[in-house]
Amino acid sequence: MRAGGSESVMEQQEKTGIFATISIVAAVGSYIATCMGHPVWGLVAALASIPLGIVGLVLSASPRVGGGMLSIAAIALGALGLIFAILGMVGVALF
């Protein structure tokens, strides 16, 4: 209680989950690695971003942790990055 007798209401600010942030960085990193001619590293980054995005999505169910939409975007980008990296590896093997 405050000195005036009124009760202070603590505001809970929603924080973006660390797993969602790492997942989106890994998804973007997979595109960068594949485009720079390293499709194996792109594949590794895409494979890492998908489970990190799933963990971020599960953790975003908490009212104190946000990043649900970011996690969904990271999962989608990771899946596309996975396809992109596989096509990059096929291109490197053929040419």
Image (spheres, helix red, strand yellow):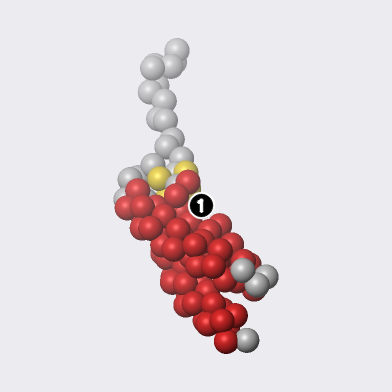
Q: What residue is shown at x 38% (from left), y 58% (from top)? A: 51
Q: Can you name the residue that lies furthest to the top here?
A: 3
Determine whether, in the image, residue 95 is placed left or right of residue 62.
right
**Residue 65: x, y in percent?**
40, 45
Determine whether, in the image, residue 58 is placed left or right of residue 44.
left
Residue nearest the observer in this picture, 19 or 31: 31
Give the amino acid at mark 1. Ile
Q: Can you name the residue that lies furthest to the bottom here?
A: 94
**Residue 84 visible in the picture:** no
Which residue does the numbered mark 1 point to in the structure image? Answer: 22
Q: What residue is shown at x 61% (from left), y 69% (from top)? A: 38
* Residue density around tag 1, few if under 14, some if 14–19, many if 20 or more, within 10 Å: some
Determine whether, in the image, residue 50 is placed left or right of residue 25.
left
Residue nearest the observer in this picture, 58 or 33: 33
Q: What residue is shown at x 51% (from left), y 61% (from top)? A: 45
Q: Give above or below for 53 relative to 62.
A: below
**Residue 52 visible in the picture:** yes
Looking at the figure, which quarter contains the C terminus?
Answer: bottom right
**Residue 86: x, y in percent?**
49, 77
* Circle count: 1
Residue nearest the observer in this picture, 23 or 73: 23
Could you tell me which secondary element the residue under label 1 belongs to? helix
Q: Give above or below for 26 relative to 6.
A: below
**Residue 71: x, y in percent?**
43, 59
Q: What residue is shown at x 60% (from left), y 80% (from top)? A: 92
**Residue 19: x, y in percent?**
45, 49
Residue nearest the observer in this picture, 94 or 18: 94
Looking at the figure, which quarter contains the N terminus?
Answer: top left
